[in-house]
């Protein structure tokens, strides 16, 4: 086994060629577009200029496409979606083993045996043992279920959900139920991992937390302990400030307000600061979470606020300025 796979441009190109169809299918049936999975919303928390209590706002979006084929397809075709998702994972595992110098094989048990030899995964995964372990766990548990669908038909479909029993060597095991929501989550998880590995999608702290949370939701499909990740919640907070200092805020106070409002969620936020003078907003700054999440008491001393100047938003409300 080659202990130093490069996962270079040529390697990633081989992965893309191998997985092109299954990624296309899953992205199509679930509309898995990056900006749809991770949308941006207007500022949902506002601190008016009079420093009164935070005001919380909710936003939603609905997208109806008349004649959309996806709902009917997903309701009738969970076996196809499941098999395609597993095939995508299988091709990813095959690619990793081949990049590690393992001879290609069609036998799942041989691939599982090679995985026990600790092959090196791409850095995105290798540096996160929890992710590597759960991908291998998914591969191990899902493989016999895939075999059932292809060979033995010990499964049933109801309303987009699927129940599958392992039937290896003629022994039918207990049924594993995968809800429609979890089937989508499984597909999203595998597609996301590949997109993070090939660099097509940006992988940051929030998306890592989302991945950890979704893997906890899929615990019955990988069989490993819970990571304990709360549901991530990320938003943009708006603060109106009078005075000359755009850093005159306390991120920990804001974090406490969010935690009290969104109980049992892992809250993070970007912060939009609007500077008010003479009853008007004259300047704006947008500070990312990575900057303001630092708990050091002297964090302001190393921040150049001018690097974070931003355009004035077009949804300023007079009542937040104390003029409404």
Image (cartoon, helix red, strand yellow):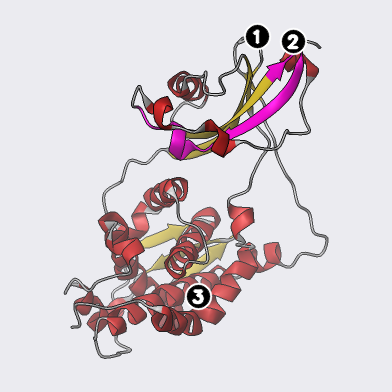
Which quadrant of the figure contains the C terminus? Answer: top right
- Identify whether 284 is placed above or below 155: above
The stretch of residues the image draws in magenta is 276-295
Which quadrant of the figure contains the N terminus? Answer: bottom left
Cα–Cα gap, marks 1 and 3: 55 Å
Q: Quadrant of residue 87?
A: bottom left
Q: Nearer the viewer, mark 3 or mark 2?
A: 2
Determine whether the residue tagged by mark 2 lies in a helix, strand or loop.
Answer: loop
Badge 3 or badge 2: first in the primary sequence: 3
Q: Would you name the residue on which mark 1 appears?
A: 50
Of residues 130 and 215, the one drawn nearer to the viewer in this rendering: 130
Percent coordinates x, y for residue 188 in the rendering:
51, 60
Residue 313 disc label: none
Which residue: 51% across, 27% down? 262
Residue 322 disc label: 2
Determine whether the residue tagged by mark 1 lies in a helix, strand or loop.
Answer: loop
Determine whether the residue tagged by mark 3 lies in a helix, strand or loop.
Answer: helix
Left or right relative to 298: residue 304? right
* CB under 8 Å between discs 1 and 2: yes
């Amino acid at each position: 086994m080659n202990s130093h796979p490069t996962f270079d441009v040529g390697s990633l190109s081989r992965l893309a060629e191998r997985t092109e169809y299954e990624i296309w299918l899953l992205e199509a049936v679930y509309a898995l577009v990056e900006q749809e999975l991770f949308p941006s919303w207007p500022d949902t928390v506002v601190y008016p200029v009079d420093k009164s209590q935070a005001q919380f706002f909710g936003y939603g979006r609905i997208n109806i496409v008349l004649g959309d084929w996806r709902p009917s397809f997903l309701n009738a075709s969970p076996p196809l979606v499941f098999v395609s998702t597993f095939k995508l994972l299988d091709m990813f595992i095959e690619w990793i083993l081949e990049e590690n110098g393992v001879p290609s094989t069609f036998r799942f048990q041989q691939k599982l045996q090679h995985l026990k030899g600790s092959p090196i995964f791409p850095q995105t995964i290798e540096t996160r043992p929890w992710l590597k372990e759960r991908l291998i766990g998914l591969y191990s548990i899902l493989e016999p279920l895939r075999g059932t669908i292809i060979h033995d038909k010990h499964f049933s479909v109801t309303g987009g959900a699927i129940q599958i029993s392992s039937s290896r060597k003629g022994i039918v095991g207990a049924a594993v139920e995968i809800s429609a929501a979890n089937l989508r989550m499984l597909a999203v998880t595998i597609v996301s991992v590949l997109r993070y590995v090939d660099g097509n999608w940006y992988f940051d702290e929030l998306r890592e937390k989302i991945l950890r949370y979704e893997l906890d939701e899929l615990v019955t499909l990988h069989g490993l302990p819970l990571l304990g990740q709360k549901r991530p919640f990320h938003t943009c907070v708006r603060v109106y400030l009078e005075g000359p200092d755009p850093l005159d805020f306390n991120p920990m106070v804001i974090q406490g307000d969010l935690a009290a409002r969104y109980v049992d969620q892992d809250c993070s936020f970007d912060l939009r600061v609007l500077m008010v003078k003479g009853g008007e907003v004259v300047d704006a700054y947008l500070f990312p979470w990575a900057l303001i999440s630092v708990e050091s008491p002297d964090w302001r001393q190393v921040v150049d606020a001018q690097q974070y100047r931003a355009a004035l938003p077009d949804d300023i409300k007079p009542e937040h300025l104390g003029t409404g």
